[in-house]
Image (cartoon, coloured by chain):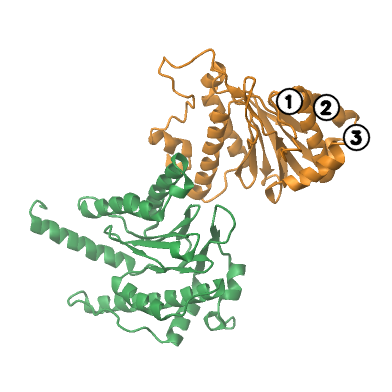
Chain colours: A green, B orange
Amino acid sequence: MYEEPYRWIEAVANRRQYLDDQFTQGNPLVGVSFAQGILLLTFNRGTEKIYEVYDRIALGGMGHPADLEKLRYTVLDMAHVEGFQRSPADVTASRLMKNGLAPVIKQAFEEIFKAPYIAKILLAEVGTTQDHDHLFTINYDGMFEEQREFGLLAASPSIRGLLTQEWKNHSPLSSLQSAVEGSLRLWGIASLLQASTSSLDTEEEGTTPSSPPSTIPDDEAIAARIRETLSKETLECVLLDRDSGKMETYRALNHTELQPFIPAMYQPSISS
Amino acid sequence: MGQQGDFLQVLREQGYAVDDLRPTFNGSGPSGHTEITAGTTVFAMKYRDGVLVAGDRRATAGNVVMYDRTDKVLELDRFSVLAIAGVPATAFEMARILEHSFKYYRRSQLQDLSFEGKLRALATLLKNNAPAALAGTGTVAPIFAGYDQLEGCGKIFFYDILGAEFEAVEYAVSGSGSSTIRGILFYMNRWGTGPIAGLNEEEALAFVLRLMTSAAEFDSATGGVDAQAQLYPIVKRISAEGVRTIPAERLKLLFSEKVLNHV
């Protein structure tokens, strides 16, 4: 039934709608480059979403855990074989994304008789200086983008546009503390915007295209969102430490380490 | 298979000859008269604060000294070290495979490979390498030393060229200079001032330098200490904090105080 081009296009469009729906309940993931390295931040409900890939590279994911695992192995295998047969210096996020992930994800998306990957992935590579940091994001259809300072995984592309704007207005992050604070805020905004788009979708039952969110929520709403999530879910935070002094830069920040970096306005009150 | 954290399997799938590390000859290559690079002294011993692993720095081919700055004590990860004796080409390749295998396992399985698992990985490589070992073109008899985090202690293992694994209670030696120092280690451990395992770091390091100097005295393939050229053995210390290299300055000081002159 998909031999005709029209049918095929329709099938792909259906597939997009199906996939978009899958991500509305997912947790956004933020990656920022700053003086000390790259910080990746998200929340999880039990399954980790940020992983070490290679000496200077980390992977963050959004979507179905089984699909993320499969894609994580694709990247891990490629990185380690390359690092072994050539040199660790030849393992780059750019090549892992362009030659490793993108073709696999795109092919799965377009083969409409098979299941697509329900996954969006961010690859971060920390450089020796901030100019050499790279952040790549890839969508479920295999479309990837490169950013230098800021990367985001979220349910809808319109959220990304708004947040990129917000990021540009933001003062540069100087310390780990400011990076955690800044990323938390960005996460809060993305999470709120994502919730508002998905509620719009359900109200209108998809009969008319939902209007994309156009404004950044106010600070109190953001703080409330973060407070609520901190009390229910686990904050997951990884630093690719430029100054680690070792080949390996990946370091997961544990709860005790993170606690002092979370501003009082975001802390869930103990009494309530 | 990659999903079980097996890097060797990943390499096999890529067509890498991980099960046969022999250099490939097309039948017409040189044979018989080729001098294989070999000959060395490496050893590991337990002392009060952990394990010390040492290796001289000379690489030889027959009577020829090829290189005097070889590093034969290789860190595989934060907690384990491989001291290599035998054909360097094969030995370095094994170390590289192991280093990547441990990394791959940790990153894919999200947990460190156990100490036993690391030992198995090395034994497998040696077993697969048996044909090359017997042919003499890929003989490797390494020492594996590391900190077992499950049991909370340092451990030393040594291997024959076919991959048989032995745990050393106090010390292990390998390489062409090992017969000299094996006797000294045995003697000192039994009739010296006390068991080697009771030495403090200062005493243990001086002992290491004396052993290496003794090995070099009787084995031309062992570099020993060349204070004039500022060449000291590579010595690494393994403890609960991980692997740490003893700086050459410290060895230099100890050498001039405790080795060069009779005390």
Percent position (x, y) of residue B175? 68, 25
Residue B173 in view in this figure: yes
Q: Chain of mark 2?
A: B
The residues bearing labels 3 and 2 have C-alpha atoms spaced at a distance of 17 Å
Q: Chain of mark 1?
A: B
Label 3 crowd (10 A; few <14 / some 14-19 / many >=20): few
The residues bearing labels 3 and 1 have C-alpha atoms spaced at a distance of 23 Å
In the image, are marks 3 and 1 on the same chain?
A: yes
Disc 2 and disc 1 in contact, CB within 8 angstroms: no
Label 1 crowd (10 A; few <14 / some 14-19 / many >=20): many
Residue B184, labelled with which disc?
Answer: 2
Percent position (x, y) of residue B96? 53, 38
In the image, what residue type sits under mark 3? His
Q: Nearer the viewer, mark 3 or mark 1?
A: 3
Disc 3 and disc 2 in contact, CB within 8 angstroms: no
Can you identify the residue that label 1 sits on? B178
Q: Chain of mark 3?
A: B
Residue drawn at x 71%, y 23% is: B220
In the image, what residue type sits under mark 1? Ser
Percent position (x, y) of residue B170? 78, 33
Residue in the foreground of this view, choosing between B34 and B15: B34
